[in-house]
Image (cartoon, rainbow, N blue to C red):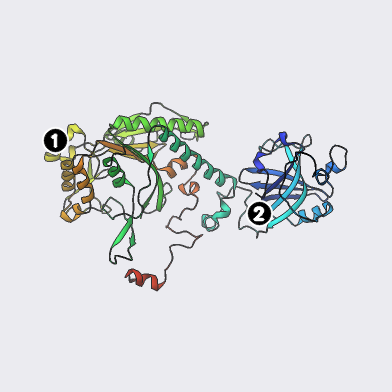
Amino acid sequence: MLKTHYCGELNLKLKGKEVVLAGWVHSRRDHGKVIFIDLRDSTGLAQLVITPTPRFERGSECRHPQDRRSSAGREAVPTVSSGRSVTSKIKEGQKLNPEFVIQVKGKVNERPAGMKNKKIATGEIEVEAIELKILSKSKTPPFELDQDTIKVNEEKRLEYRYLDLRTERMAKNLKTRFELIQFIRNYLQDRGFTEIQTPILSKSTPEGARDYLVPSRLHQGKFFALPQSPQQYKQLLMVAGVERYFQIAPCFRDEDARADRSPGEFYQIDIEMSFVEREDVLKLTEEMFSQMIKKIFPKKKINQIPWPRITHQETIKKYKSDKPDLRQDKKDKDELAFAWIIDFPLFTKQTKEDFFHGAGNKLAPSHHMFTAPREEDVKYLETDPSKVKSYQYDLVLNGFEVGGGSIRIHDPKIQEKIFNLIGFDKKDKKMFSHILRAFEYGVPPHGGIAPGLDRLLMILENEPNIREVIAFPKTGDGRDPMMDTPSEVKEEQLKELGIKIDLKKK
């Protein structure tokens, strides 16, 4: 290790101790014979003081650390530099520019009275430099990193995302994202869930959005698809007897961007359970999120517990929306208004964006084709499908849909009937032959939910768009300026795949 301590660890308990720190120059304040450096690492800031001669050399309080190297029990520290006189430190300090990476050995002192900074965790101490070494120099960044970059041109921020992530707000968002995921993992593990990773290379099936296709080199003319969600795999895991599954799952959909939707890929907290009813799923989710918010976002206040449950018909009639904002004060950034929307129609009208082949049939699933109809409404499948309500449920928060789920169909005959009603022919059904075959071998009643991780965090962090909580997001038109993607590939790669590009003028 090139350091003995992290910046954020320093406190008055280390007063008089020698430490070695390493990190980035956050700022420099040159006062002639004294230079102050704010050193930054992943844990926070620490103030360095650079003087020609260490303060403790001028008094009898303590000898120079070099004179104490043989002291019994002294903790070894990494070597910073060799042969550098302490009087040259001012010149070294004057060479330092923002974002230089440095290593410094120094003594922890209590800041003088009136010089303490209550705004930072290490504001009671400073580190008086003994030795200093530049590990890496930096060009002048394209935008200032000691300030919030929210107003900086987003294209520029994404082009230099690795710099943007050094800023305080963005670094905090990444850490909070980790804390949220870790809480979810621990919560579900404690309740008997098993985390299972499902395939990324999957099968293209009509599920409501455009697939991202991956050509096969070994089987030319055939394609994999990136999963729109792990929906079919998690249902197959229920058939496999897992009973309680979860995954922080990547999902891929070729959709247009919105402020609350990332084009291309996003993550969801994917949960599935066997031998459950709707109430079991809602209760688990409600308790999990309520406890998570209490621990990670203690300033947030959930305005109603238990969360209200509103039928789809009621919310459309009263709020003209299926994702109502139920906050009492919509200007209060710390108010959280969760609600469950239940009893959706099983079917909706097909649109041009529906990837179903109905040959004139106008029905499409409201949620997806594996959602179970309410038991009391099954009779209407034969006579009037428009009357059928489902066991679908959506989770809304402050006017956003942050999750959706349902109790699934576990009766192969009902699944076949749904396929027929949305207009599937034999070829379409063959795409789902793996599901239908699996359901012939004893499938338990099951259901689940998939809250959107990115969107949920966006709301909890009071961010204006979803890109602020994703490490390396795409632009609104689906590009990555940092990696310069999507990009062309070599002709040889296309030949290996048996692909020819036909670019037609628009």
Residue 406 seen anywhere in this rendered image of the structure: yes
- Residue 70, percent across and down? 80, 43
Could you say whether the residue bearing mark 1 is in a helix, strand or loop? loop
| Three-letter residue code for mark 2 | Glu
| Three-letter residue code for mark 1 | Lys
- Above/below status of 297 relative to 101: above
Could you say whether the residue bearing mark 2 is in a helix, strand or loop? loop
Residue 269 image label: none
Q: Residue furthest left?
A: 383
Q: Residues within 10 Å of mark 2 (few under 14, many from 20)?
A: many
Q: In the rendered view, does 82 fall on the left or right side of 480?
A: right
- Above/below status of 94 relative to 180: below
N-term mark: 2 or 1: 2
| Quarter that holds the C terminus | bottom left
Residue 99 image label: 2
- Above/below status of 453 relative to 352: above
- Residue 302, percent across and down? 45, 29
- Residue at (43% x, 40% y) in the render: 456
- Residue 138, percent across and down? 66, 59
Q: Nearer the viewer, residue 8 or 199?
A: 199
Q: Nearer the viewer, residue 389 or 238?
A: 238
Q: Residues within 10 Å of mark 1 (few under 14, many from 20)?
A: some
Q: Are marks 2 and 1 in contact (CB under 8 Å)?
A: no
Residue tagged by mark 1? 379
The residues bearing labels 2 and 1 have C-alpha atoms spaced at a distance of 68 Å
- Above/below status of 101 relative to 234: below
Residue 327 seen anywhere in this rendered image of the structure: no
Q: Quadrant of residue 161 in the image?
A: bottom right
Q: Quadrant of residue 114 in the image?
A: top right
Q: Nearer the viewer, residue 440 or 465?
A: 440
- Residue 237, percent across and down? 30, 43
